[in-house]
Image: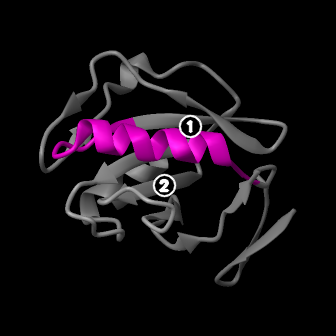
Amino acid sequence: MRVMHGEHTYFMTIFGIQKETLDLLFQMGRDAHPNEFVALLKERDGIIDEINLLPGTVTGEKSASLFFDMMPLSTHLAGSCHSHPNGVLLPSDADVHFFPRAGRFHFIIGYPYTQLDWRCYFSDGQRCRMEVIR
């Protein structure tokens, strides 16, 4: 798959996110509310289908952070997901600083955590279209 991003062309192996995985992320957002949560996402055969919660993760009402020393050594790391309990689906400056450390694709899910309350971004904070695989 070839994706255009500005003037750059990227060749990627990520084709989408599994619907069940996205549904689980919404449930994690509801369960953590009013706090944020953060997790890493892994892919298999180009489909994001696994969520990794790292030991040492710190969550609160305004932020969540990972203990990067606990990141698994894997070539299948696709990116991250975190929630915005305030419902804003745009990445903050802190998010854009975090993204490059945790893969290429980053999901933000927001309150009220329904099928319409998510966005995907590239590591530089630019919006990315991501297919939901049923």
Depth check: 19 or 47 in front?
Answer: 19
In this picture, residue 60 sits left or right of residue 66: left
Q: Position of residue 35 (x, y in %)?
A: 18, 42
Number of marks in the rendered image: 2
Which is nearer the N-term, disc 2 or disc 1? 1
Q: What residue is pinned by disc 1?
A: 41
Query: Would residue 29 be seen by someone viewing this image from the given angle?
Result: yes
Structural crowding at the residue carrying mark 1, measured as other residues with C-alpha within 10 Å and reported as few (<14), some (14–19) or many (≥20): many
| Amino acid carrying mark 2 in the image | Phe
Residue at the image point whose x is 84% and y is 37% from the top: 45
Circles 2 and 1: CB atoms closer than 8 Å:
yes
- Tell me the CA gap for discs 2 and 1: 9 Å
In this picture, residue 122 sits left or right of residue 83: right
In this picture, residue 35 sits left or right of residue 39: left
Residue 128 against residue 26 in the figure, above or below = below
Residue 56 image-quadrant placement: top left
Describe the colour scheme in one phrase. one colour
Q: Position of residue 96 (x, y in %)?
A: 37, 60
| Magenta span main SS | helix
| Quarter of the image that includes the N terminus | bottom right
Residue at the image point whose x is 43% and y is 51% from the top: 99
Q: What residue is pinned by disc 2?
A: 107
Magenta residue check for 95: no
Residue 109 against residue 81 in the figure, above or below = below
- Where disc 2 sits, the SS reads strand
Q: Position of residue 60 (x, y in %)?
A: 13, 39
Query: Would residue 102 be seen by someone viewing this image from the given angle?
Result: no
Residue at the image point whose x is 50% and y is 73% from the top: 126
Tell me the magenta residue range.
Answer: 16-38
| Amino acid carrying mark 1 in the image | Leu
